[in-house]
Image: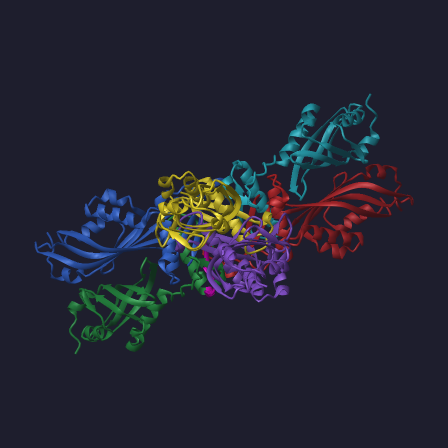
Chain colours: A cyan, B red, C green, D blue, E purple, F yellow
Amino acid sequence: MPVITITLIEGYDEATRRRLSENLTDAARSVIAAPLDGVTVLVNEVAPANYMRGRQSRIPGPPLPAPQEVVEEFLKAMQARDLAAARKFLSDDFVMTFPGGVSFTKLEQLVDWAKPRYRSIAKTYERFDSLATAGESVVYYFGTLAGERCDGSSFSGIRFIDRFTLQNGLLTSQLVWNDLGELAKSNQSCP
Amino acid sequence: MPVITITLIEGYDEATRRRLSENLTDAARSVIAAPLDGVTVLVNEVAPANYMRGRQSRIPGPPLPAPQEVVEEFLKAMQARDLAAARKFLSDDFVMTFPGGVSFTKLEQLVDWAKPRYRSIAKTYERFDSLATAGESVVYYFGTLAGERCDGSSFSGIRFIDRFTLQNGLLTSQLVWNDLGELAKSNQSCP
Amino acid sequence: MPVITITLIEGYDEATRRRLSENLTDAARSVIAAPLDGVTVLVNEVAPANYMRGRQSRIPGPPLPAPQEVVEEFLKAMQARDLAAARKFLSDDFVMTFPGGVSFTKLEQLVDWAKPRYRSIAKTYERFDSLATAGESVVYYFGTLAGERCDGSSFSGIRFIDRFTLQNGLLTSQLVWNDLGELAKSNQSCP
Amino acid sequence: MPVITITLIEGYDEATRRRLSENLTDAARSVIAAPLDGVTVLVNEVAPANYMRGRQSRIPGPPLPAPQEVVEEFLKAMQARDLAAARKFLSDDFVMTFPGGVSFTKLEQLVDWAKPRYRSIAKTYERFDSLATAGESVVYYFGTLAGERCDGSSFSGIRFIDRFTLQNGLLTSQLVWNDLGELAKSNQSCP
Amino acid sequence: MPVITITLIEGYDEATRRRLSENLTDAARSVIAAPLDGVTVLVNEVAPANYMRGRQSRIPGPPLPAPQEVVEEFLKAMQARDLAAARKFLSDDFVMTFPGGVSFTKLEQLVDWAKPRYRSIAKTYERFDSLATAGESVVYYFGTLAGERCDGSSFSGIRFIDRFTLQNGLLTSQLVWNDLGELAKSNQSCP
Amino acid sequence: MPVITITLIEGYDEATRRRLSENLTDAARSVIAAPLDGVTVLVNEVAPANYMRGRQSRIPGPPLPAPQEVVEEFLKAMQARDLAAARKFLSDDFVMTFPGGVSFTKLEQLVDWAKPRYRSIAKTYERFDSLATAGESVVYYFGTLAGERCDGSSFSGIRFIDRFTLQNGLLTSQLVWNDLGELAKSNQSCP
């Protein structure tokens, strides 16, 4: 039953306004059990000269890239081992943490670390979850890993989950959990 | 800069209205880079007789329990091995999935499965993330595990993450990832 | 899809606010083909000190009696031939017009006119329609007449329609059409 | 004193928006005795991307033709005995009922029925009333009939009233009452 | 024609809300030539839990004393030469400036300065003007002075104007202009 | 904390809308001690067809010239002794009153009166204050006078204040106070 109105300085594109309306709908329904059809969202756009706070016009905050899309672009670049492209999505203080608690701040460190572990690896995504907190956006991605071990045998269906944080549209952290632990044991090092 | 107004049928308690306002704030800021202080949320409450959709008064959807609190209560009951209490938080179609892809629908199955693996285990939570999707609420919890192996030796600092889904305030699934894989190998079965 | 908000000075009872919401819903749907469930009406009540027009507080206009109810009460009194009660619903300039264009300004005139026409008559109502125009409320009522002729024979199922106008809750006119014309012909005058 | 705001998806033409504002004004004043000058109506238009109900954009309901205009066009075609043109205004389940309770579903039936009754007939309209109910629009029209009898004599000033119902801009019924009863009696059949 | 809505956290008394509405009306009409009766002001009050900016509840700013009333109380105390009472209306950095550009920061300095100039003086107020600027409230007061010279003769009808500034309800400055210049010349010093 | 929304018929230029927002901000802060950054003003513009009061469209009141600018233009013309230009800013019932209570209705009277008093005079403005009352706009201007006496000697730093009233953008009165009293005494008449 809630009717939600959001007043914005005009200038956001349609996709941004729709994303906003969807997120506001979900936010309301995470707190009250309103039927989906009962939630109305209205976006009210005003010209820049029609908004004043503290006797000052304000410059509207730029739309943020959809966090999921940033993550997907980053993962695509990583999959292609295009580190230069992947690096563009990282903030200066980016940290990634892998099973066993191993942490890296550079993509090259990750590549070096992974090299003796498997010849190739690919992720199949089942599902992502995205949320905003007071300070950052968070994206979860989970699915399964498949690839080739150093001994040439293959593996698949290995469960994994990644948690990314973003600030101002850039990745600030990646946490990784997966079921590769057992795999690693039985594996011989790649040359 | 956004000003968000949500009109509700009156009757929600203060905590619910505040949670709603916080979630709406976060939802807006997940899409546009508005400074925190620039986001205003107004809750407008109307009497039941003052709301009509389709020429009918509507009964407001009940407030949902904060998903994080449901999860915490469930985990507390599980930690205390009070299965009866824990079961109250589960929907009929609850499924839990553990590393290696092992799934259970009954808490007893989990207990039996865990018994030969470690004598005791405790979770330390670092952080939770909560979000609402069109159909369900999702709660992520991650931190570290500590406990005692069957051979009496102890372990700690083992990374884990849980993903819970909730519908109508009840848990519908729990997915678990952790770094226990290596541990399991080196462990001897508990008697 | 329309969302209608009406701001009122507080003080109207629930029934009045609901009637208002229903009428606003119908008014919108008489102009645009919105599905019934897509029309939301919100009544926003403000304290008298919270409304000012022209730098002056305003006294809210009193709720009007539902025109249909005024008409029903009047008709009930007429049916019981309680002219004193019926007269209370009439404005000073009330005029009633019957088939053939006969007009009366007093209820007694009607009674005298009807006397030689039938011994008794009763109305069965099928349906009423009510509307507001810029200056007055209009109520239509139609159904069938049944009664006894002066010669003792009975009649029934004679179609009729009444049109009433109201100002400030009082009847200002009644126009009557019916199929009694043929009946009148074949009838002999009551003594 | 009421201030009414209606939020619409943009796209309705000016005439439709004005008709909407007039109807909303009348609807409010049919329930509370607010002075005409105290009723303010604001139409708030939002882009299609700025309206979402149930997480979905909605297609605005098309504007309905003013019911009075549909009726007038229909009557003009009937007056000209242009049945093909008149038929375009009828829904498939259109029924018309005349004095004495005679009903027709085809315009041809009406023409055949009327033929032996008068050589020609014309309606002079005094006034129409239009209203919307939950399911349909209703238009009342009343005035007087004039024409020529089969014996060549003329008549005029015969009171009549028509009640039309419309759904989705098409006529679904016409109920007719008039004072022709007496006329019919004294009339000889047209050849 | 403007409709102004102001949303406040509830708790302000009626007089404050009315003053607010009057000032908003005047503010609008200082910029656009709207007829007085065309300006509607609605005060929308929300519970403290229903207002959030920057994800925080806010404590509503206290109502300010009407600047004119502060000035009147101060002038009444000065007229009665009750310096202790008058001092309560002054901020710490209060400065008063008199014709000829003489400035004082203490009320006693004024009294000493005035003593040789006239035996008694009283102000008759014709009119006050009050306004708010970004940082302070300003009150203008003008009228005429009457009193007794040191030689015992009397004077009256001497034009004066005072300009007061207030911050947080306390006087920060008083500027005085008047036509006493000529008077002073012809006057002999009081003993 | 107040959120102020003003709904206008569209057509006012940006400067007018900004001035309106500033004045509304100041108006609110003259009554409640809200921090500047907590006052949000939204201007909501509707098409002419989207505003109806009393079932009638309304022509928006024209924007008034900023009262301060009218006064400044008038003073500039007076300074240049361009009486024809200055006269354009005056309403028909304009009255100006000078120290000693001398009043004029024509600019020529002022010029004649001033001629024997000083050879030349110029105003330095320190500050203006502008406000709207129910019936008129008021502008205060104060600063210092400098010029040349008839005996050729010069003066400067003489305090003055002007109070202007405006209706419909034209000056209706000017009240003047200054410290020239003493100056006048010691001055010899200009030839």
- Measuring 40% from the left and 55% from the top, which residue is drawn there? E36
Q: In this view, does D76 lie above or below E179?
A: above
Judged left or right of residue A54, residue C137 is left
Q: Give the range drawn in magenta.
A: C4-14
Membership of C7 in magenta stretch? yes
Query: In this orientation, which residue lies closer to the viewer: D20 or F46?
Result: F46
Q: Which residue is drawn at 19% across and 49% down?
A: D111
Name the residue nearer the viewer: C87 or D22: D22
| Spot occupied by residue F101 in the image (x, y as percentages of width and height) | 42, 55
| Residue C146 inside the magenta-drawn segment | no
Q: Quadrant of residue C53?
A: bottom left
Q: Relative to E171, is B149 on the left or the right? A: right
Which residue is outermost to the right?
Answer: B152
Q: Is residue D53 visible?
A: no
The percent coordinates of residue D119 (x first, y second) are 12, 51
Classify residue E28 as left or right of residue B164. Answer: left
Q: Where is residue E135 in the image (x, y as percent from the top left)?
A: 58, 49
In this rendering, the answer to whether D186 lies above or below B152 is below
